[in-house]
Image (cartoon, grey):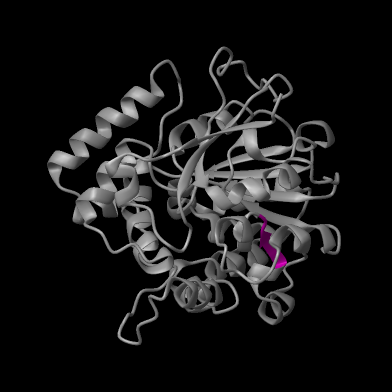
Amino acid sequence: MATFTYKPLTTELARAVQVPTNGPLVEVHLNDSSNLPKGDGSRTGVAPAHCVLNEHYKLFAERIRNLTVYKDDLWIVTAPKCGTTWTQEMIWLLDNALDYQRAADINLIHRSIFIELSALVPGFDQNTIALVEQMQRPRHIKSHLPMALLPQQLWTVRPRIVYCARNPKDMVTSFYHHYRHMHGYTGPKDTFFEAILHDLVMFQPQIPHTLDFWALRNEPNVLFLHFEEMKRNMAAVLKRACEFLGKSYSQEELQRLEQHLSFEVMKTNDSANNSILLKLMKSISATDDNKDSFQFMRKGMVGSHREELSSEYIEKLNAYIGRQLRGSSFKFHE
């Protein structure tokens, strides 16, 4: 039996949100989920989250699935636009003796490699899976893939995994701007938002992705965070992260780190704000525009969707969220 099933997305709405940068999109489903972790049992009887990716991903799916995982790896896993970069920088510094000089000298995209990037962007001239394979250990690795598509050794070797969740309403808003400026989407905003409700956009659906990891939140090798928690009480998050990593820092050191991780500082920190990735994606997607002031780290706010989503769409999105959370005790933070 094949490891994955690929379902082409060919409806009019699906085609309307596909972009040349990524190529045609497909749903990717794992055929045999029997070896996935059961966690707290809340996902028993529920198929693990599938994922919308692109046709090109097929060339890399097995290599990612069969990647050699090491016990001293540290994986940052999130859905897109859910505090990924923020979490990467926080965890890397905590895990590396708060070495700000090294963090400044080596860009975050090299310190914490986005493993599936080259699979999703055919025009990217490096193989990010090979880069992960060649990384000096201990490795920090970033992924937006759901549990079912990640390396199968994650569930036997059990390295450290940090997951960050974010309210879908803010994710959708941020992802729209990301899709426009990073991937070259030029269609109507309403079309993109409607496609989200039908799970037709890259890396969707977000909610089952989150629920699969929520079920693992009590595992000793998993740290489950909320974007909103990081915004409102970073000091408490840093304390939990230190305990998870087995690190101890003084109050003064943690206060300095909290300042370093503030949105205002992160946004202007070219070693950690993904400005390099933004320039690269703009060149590949042919959306480079000197008049374009878009930044990868755009607002970083809680509740910013209220400024951009209509009340009618918020009502639809709430219904969509409610359907996907049915039967679960999990709640997104507001």
Q: Quadrant of the C terminus?
A: top left
Q: Position of residue 246 (x, y in %)?
A: 79, 48
In the image, residue 127 sits, relative to residue 53, either above or below, namely: below
Left or right, 205 with reference to 299: right
Residue at 34%, 44% in the rendered image? 14
Q: Taking the image as drawn, is residue 259 in sight?
A: yes
Q: Quadrant of the N terminus?
A: top right
Q: Taking the image as drawn, is residue 300 in sight?
A: no
In the figure, residue 2 lies in which quadrant?
Answer: top right
Instruction: Report the span colored magenta.
Output: 111-115
In the image, residue 275 sits, relative to residue 31, either above or below, namely: below
Q: Position of residue 13 (x, y in %)?
A: 28, 43
Quick one: 158 or 94, which is closer to the camera?
A: 158
Residue at 47%, 50% in the rendered image? 82
In the orientation shown, which residue stands out farthest toward the bottom?
Answer: 290
Answer whether residue 232 is magenta in the image. Answer: no
Residue at 62%, 63% in the rendered image? 89
Quick one: 1 or 131, which is closer to the camera?
A: 1
Q: Position of residue 124 (x, y in %)?
A: 60, 69
Residue at 79%, 46% in the rendered image? 67
Q: Main secondary structure of the magenta part?
A: strand
Left or right, 263 with reference to 137: left
Quick one: 60 or 180, which is closer to the camera?
A: 60
In the image, residue 56 sits, relative to residue 186, either above or below, namely: above
Q: Position of residue 240 (x, y in %)?
A: 64, 45
Number of numbered discs: 0
In the figure, residue 183 lies in which quadrant?
Answer: bottom left
Left or right, 211 with reference to 219: left
Left or right, 160 with reference to 281: right
Quick one: 154 or 95, which is closer to the camera?
A: 154
